[in-house]
Amino acid sequence: MQRILHVDDEPDIREIVRMSLSMVGRFDVEQCASGVEALDKAEAANPDLIILDVMMPHLDGEETFVRLREIDALADTPIIFMTARASSADYQKLRDLGAADIVIKPFDPMTLPDQLREIWARSGSA
């Protein structure tokens, strides 16, 4: 796992994730500010892993997930949701959709890369 696509509408979250993954984790990070932008750029980015915010305007994370899965080149790419939602029903809904896992906001930028590596290993993509 080297290339990660991160999708979040919040500039501050994008910056924290970018710094965490590129500086601490040494990953190549491509970022998008919306689900629409992700759909435009995802296939060309050729990510090994996608991190997707749940609550975004216009095209939320769940709909973006479904549409990313329709792109043949990304059909099996592990997708992790990142959310501040705290309900176990929300988590179960995302897992039922096919999420590799869920990262809870707020997250620790120093441990996020290792958390993603663990999820990657569990997803069977390693």
Image (cartoon, grey):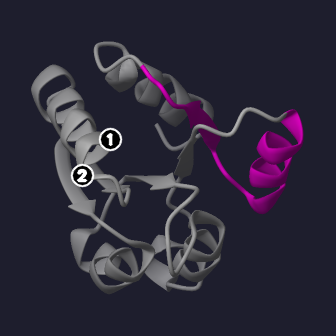
Quadrant position of residue 67: bottom right
Q: Is residue 39 above or below residue 53?
A: below
Residue 73 visible in rendering: yes
Q: Nearer the viewer, residue 101 or 105?
A: 105
The total of numbered circles placed on residues is 2
Residue under pointer 1: 1
Q: Which mark is residue 11?
A: 2
Residue type at mark 2: give it. Pro
Q: Secondary structure at mark 1?
A: loop
Residue 2 visible in rendering: no
- Please report the residue visible at 68 percent of the width from the left and 40 percent of the height from the top: 85
- Please report the residue visible at 75 percent of the width from the left and 52 percent of the height from the top: 94
Query: Do the residues under discs 2 and 1 have CB atoms within 8 angstroms?
Result: no
Residue type at mark 1: give it. Met
Q: Is residue 31 above or below residue 57?
A: above
Q: Nearer the viewer, residue 43 or 85?
A: 85
